[in-house]
Amino acid sequence: MIITVANQKGGVGKTTTVVNLATALASIDKKVLVIDMDPQYNSSMSIDVYDPKLSIYRVFSNEVKINQAIQKSQIPNLDVISACEDLAAAEYELADDENRNYLLKGYINSLINDYDYIFIDTPPTLGLLTISSLAASDEILIPVQCEFFALEGLSKLIKTIDAVKKNLNSNLKLNGIILTMYDRRNSLSSLIEKEAREYFETNVYKFNVPRNVKLSEAPSHGLPAIIYDLKCSGSQAYIALAKEFLERSMDQIGK
């Protein structure tokens, strides 16, 4: 199964969600691949796997084959294809390619049978890198920060997903919405949660990701939070989310 984690707004927890869900699933013997499609390459650094010579950009440039770009992480069952700064130029270099929206899909189709889950981390834009990720995916997972303009941005993203389904990938499904940076002491967080659950109903995950210092510290050590500090509230939230993710994925398979 291929899952894109996306939101056109930065700082909402996309990378944190990708890295920690992938690690949680790998820890229960699921074979997982993370593809970093963000030129800031935060996912790559958060798992301490970064090599610009073996990045997804080099695959797009036909300098390396997709299977050669796969790097083993320090976490058993978790592989990574890293991003690099040059990936930012891909949107311009591929602008005249009629197949640009399906380029990623063409490359990763050969990897589907090698992994239980392929997670794609996307940049905070709705440009070519994100659209091509959605075109290649079975599902989309959306982290949403509990802040004032969050739901407005989410509505716009849902419209983009509908457009992708209509024009590029009719099989794309919404896996769910994860509320991040939740603060129980902040009435705004509670209000955003209430509105999200009323409007998007069961699409919203049961568990929220709390605002947590350890989640912020972990990437500087090149570690997912659930390895950096398993007992912290952020790690425990992602473990609970991983269980719910599996339930939702099984539900989709059954449909």
Image: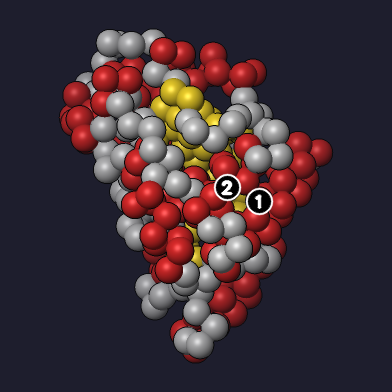
104 on left or right of 94: right
Residue at 44% over, 23% down = 71
Say which residue label 2 marks: 21
Say which residue label 1 marks: 242
- Circle nearer the N terminus (2, 1): 2
**Mark 2 and 1 residues: CB-CB less than 8 Å, in contact?**
yes
- Colouring of the image: secondary structure
Depth check: give the residue in front, 70 or 191: 70
Image quarter of residue 12:
bottom left
Depth check: give the residue in front, 126 or 22: 22
Above/below status of 204 relative to 109: below
Q: Quadrant of the C terminus?
A: top right
Q: Quadrant of the N terminus?
A: top right
Taking the view exactly as shown, the residue that stands out farthest to the right is 254
Depth check: give the residue in front, 86 or 156: 86
Residue at 27% over, 38% down = 39
The disc labelled 2 sits on which kind of residue? Leu
Depth check: give the residue in front, 3 or 84: 84
Locate residue 115, reporting x and y percent: 62, 25
238 on left or right of 15: right
Residue at 46% over, 13% down = 67
For residue 74, say whether it is visible: yes
The disc labelled 1 sits on which kind of residue? Ala
